[in-house]
Amino acid sequence: MEVSERIGSLDLIRGVAILGIPFMNIMSMAAPEVAYSVPGWYEGAGVADYAVYVVQSLLVESRFISLFSILFGVGLAIQADRFVRLGVNPRPMLRRRLGWLLLFGLAHGFLIWSGDVLALYAVTGFVVLHWVDWPVRRLVRVGVAFVLVGQLALGAAIAASLATGDNLMEVPTLPYSSVDLASLRATWTGTGRATANATAYAELLAAIPLTLFWHTAGLMAFGIALYRRGFFTDREAWRRVLPWSAGGAVAAAGVLWFRFRVGLDSSAAAATMSIMMIPGFLMALGYAAGLVRWADSERAPHLRTRLQTTGRMAFTVYLSQSVLLVGYFIAVAPQLWGALGRLQLWIIVLGVVMLQTVGARWWSRRFGQGPMERLWRRLAFGSS
């Protein structure tokens, strides 16, 4: 069941978001978890590692996942509206869709990669589904409240870490030596990898009620509000969001300064991952507004079409990223797990996302809907 008239900007934004996400995710796929937030996690980290880390912090971290969260809320609103027009109660139908997404997410997280967000989106979607017909102002108020509540747990961790000096975020002693990495590599790419991955994912699921749920629900609420206000078809939307995005950029620079000030390998710096989500969201609005404008222009039509095609297959693309990247460091080159710096990992990701845009275009021309999108639709609605 598809929207009869697709909004081109949504496909474009979704395509950019899904291809931008692995530039952060790769750090926890190809290295110890701490590498996600600490550039000097291994001996020999150099200027390139810190330079890429700065770019990640200022332009990538929380930006693309924020776009994806916003668009998930938009998707719920669009689907609910369409069911209403058909005279069908949308909630039972969408609960089935979310239920299958939850199962996909749990399988993805436990069996492939512990950083899965699909289960989070499904659980959050069950709540946000009840908001799709709310007025815009109420959605904005609830969005702000939920985002702020999502800051409480890690905000308290920052304050307590600074006040007591305790390692509340359990940051390991860094940098890892070659011996340490060899031991970790045996755990994450050997026979114990399945257990280690499942344990890490269970810990992530346990954290959902504390931080992830609140922030994600808030962004979904903002997504619905933006859709109701016509943001995704307004070429001039960038004028209204520019001050907010600029403020987000300044705030992101402030968070980055704080991290360097307290030490990138400190507990307080690790906890600022939550704070960075707010400027990440504000800057994501600017990204989205720019893409809305591009979607309705004649600039780079070939690239735009490829990104839109990729966006229409975002579910398939997301899962295939895990299979390709995690599989590479398990089955193809296990010796490289924990052995590559940020710049080298970005080069690998760039190759994967280029392959995915080509693959999405090829598949779309021959089969139309993506394979996972088609499966999800059949399971949820029983239609071809």
Image: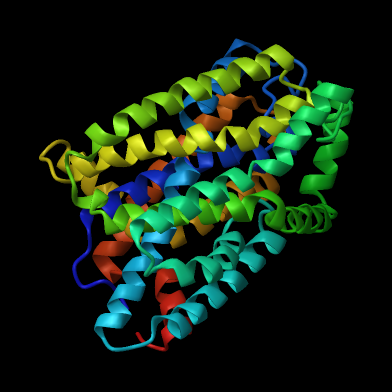
Mark yes or no: residue 100 visible: yes
> At 72% from the left edge and 38% from the top edge, which residue is drawn?
154
Tell me, what colour scheme is on the image? rainbow
**Image side of residue 223 versus residue 109, left or right:** left
Decide which of 382, 293 is in the foreground and name it: 293
Quadrant of the image containing the N terminus: bottom left
Tally the marks: 0
Decide which of 171, 308 is in the foreground and name it: 171
**Residue 177 quadrant:** top right
**Image side of residue 355 versus residue 306, left or right:** right
Q: Position of residue 19 (x, y in %)?
A: 42, 44
> At 84% from the left edge and 23% from the top edge, which residue is drawn?
163
**Residue 263 quadrant:** top right
> At 57% from the left edge and 63% from the top edge, which residue is drawn?
124
Is 35 located above or below residue 261 in the figure? below
Q: Position of residue 235 (x, y in %)?
A: 17, 42
Q: Residue furthest left?
A: 298
Q: Position of residue 238 (x, y in %)?
A: 25, 35
Mark yes or no: residue 324 visible: no
Quadrant of the image containing the C terminus: bottom left
**Image side of residue 47 versus residue 58, left or right:** right
Is 364 located above or below residue 183 in the figure? below
Q: Position of residue 375 (x, y in %)?
A: 45, 77
